[in-house]
Amino acid sequence: MNKVRSALLLIMASVTAFTTVSCSKDSGPDRGRETTAPQTVLTFWDENAGPSRTPYYMELIRRFEGRHPGIRVQYVGIPVSINKTKYDTAISSGSLPDVAAINADWIADFASKDVLFAAGPVLRQLAGAGSDRPVLHRI
């Protein structure tokens, strides 16, 4: 489970640097002015959803959102029976999620399709210059 937690936190940390902000607008007399704080919504796909894993991810997401109030994570659980098909369809149609847990066996396939994000530079930036502290502890 530690690897799953680390992978999720690593993925979420890398994506937060590249998210876009959307603001809701009021329809009242102050129309056009921001009425709520900027909110970033990240879609997270879990490729092996189920009773033993989904609650674990939901708790990690709750903690992540608590530490990052401007970010909301939309969890999408995908049953293992259709997971690879769903990912392949999303790749073909250009409708991938912001963040995804993937099976290690898929890495070569996804790399050949150029759909993986190189998180190294972002993680180094999050850790800070000269930091010897693991970036996952700073999330």
Image (spheres, grey):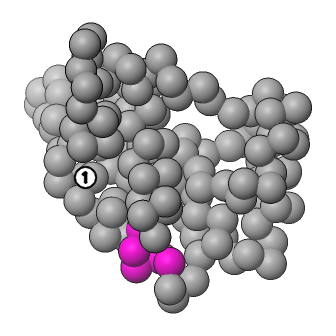
> Which residue is rendered at x = 47% and y = 17% of the image?
121
6 vs 84, nearest the viewer: 6
Q: Is residue 79 magenta?
A: no
- Residue 67 location in percent, x, y? 17, 47
Q: Secondary structure at mark 1?
A: helix
Residue 36's x, y, as percent? 16, 38
| Amino acid type, callout 1 | Glu
Is 87 left, or right, of 38 in this rendering?
right
Location of residue 109 (image quadrant): top right
Above or below 35: residue 85: below
Residue 8 vertical placement versus 109 (above, below)? below
**Residue 104 shows in the view:** yes
Q: Residues within 10 Å of mark 1 (few under 14, many from 20)?
A: some
Residue occupying image coordinates x 32% and y 42%:
136
Q: Magenta stretch: dominant SS?
A: helix
Q: Quadrant of residue 39?
A: top left
Against 90, is 38 above or below?
A: above
For residue 80, side relative to residue 39 (left or right): right
Residue 95 occupies which quadrant of the picture? top right
Residue 24 visible? The answer is no
Residue occupying the point 58% across, 70% down: 77
Screen quadrant of the C terminus: top left
Reading the image, the residue beneath label 1 is 65
Read off the magenta span.
53-57
Q: Residue at x 74, y 33 (%)?
A: 115
